[in-house]
């Protein structure tokens, strides 16, 4: 069983930056594909960024150029650096982990709130 705990959310002004962190425990972290999702009020959950076990990354078009996902296998951490934040980035951000062979995340964190507002 893998446990995921997010941190780093908060209130930030438009144009500001945040770095979200996700601490993983249990399981073999290096064997997990990791991702960040978000759910904005009244909207469906969407994938923000993902990183494979080999370090290949993908980012949603809505955050491309403004965000960077990274991982530290030694620390069992995954990060999401977000810059030039916009009000539409306001959402609960969730960390996810997907085992080899799974087509969807197998594990989820509880989420961290990001609010972008002046």
Image (cartoon, rainbow, N blue to C red):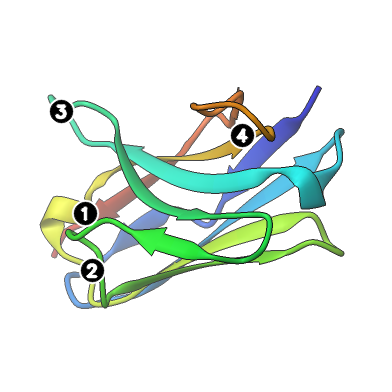
Residue named by callout 2: 85
- Separation of disc 4 and disc 3 at Cα? 23 Å
Q: Quadrant of the N terminus?
A: top right
- Separation of disc 3 and disc 2 at Cα? 18 Å
Left or right position of 87 against 98: left
In the picture, residue 71 is in which quadrant?
bottom right
Residue named by callout 1: 89
* Whole-percent x, y for residue 118 in the image: 13, 65
Residue named by callout 4: 98
Residue named by callout 3: 43
Task: Give the number of callouts.
Answer: 4
Q: Nearer the viewer, residue 10 or 111?
A: 111
* Whole-percent x, y for residue 89 in the image: 21, 54
Residue found 61% across the figure and 23% down from its top: 106
Residue found 22% across the figure and 69% down from its top: 13
Q: Which label's residue is closer to the chain start, 4 or 3? A: 3
Q: Secondary structure at mark 1?
A: helix
In the picture, residue 51 is in which quadrant?
bottom right
Cβ atoms at labels 1 and 4 below 8 Å apart: no
Q: Which label's residue is closer to the chain start, 3 or 1? A: 3
* Whole-percent x, y for residue 63 in the image: 24, 63
């Amino acid at each position: 069983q893998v446990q995921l705990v997010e941190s780093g959310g908060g209130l930030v002004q438009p144009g500001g930056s945040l770095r979200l962190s996700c601490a993983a425990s249990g399981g073999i972290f290096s064997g997990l594909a990791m991702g960040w999702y978000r759910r904005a009020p009244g909207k469906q959950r969407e994938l923000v960024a993902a990183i494979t076990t080999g370090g290949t990354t993908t980012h949603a078009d809505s955050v491309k150029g403004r965000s960077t996902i990274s991982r530290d296998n030694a620390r069992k951490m995954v990060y999401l650096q977000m810059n030039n934040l916009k009000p539409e980035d306001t959402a609960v951000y969730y960390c996810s982990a997907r085992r080899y062979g799974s087509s969807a995340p197998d594990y989820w964190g509880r989420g961290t709130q990001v609010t972008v507002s002046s």
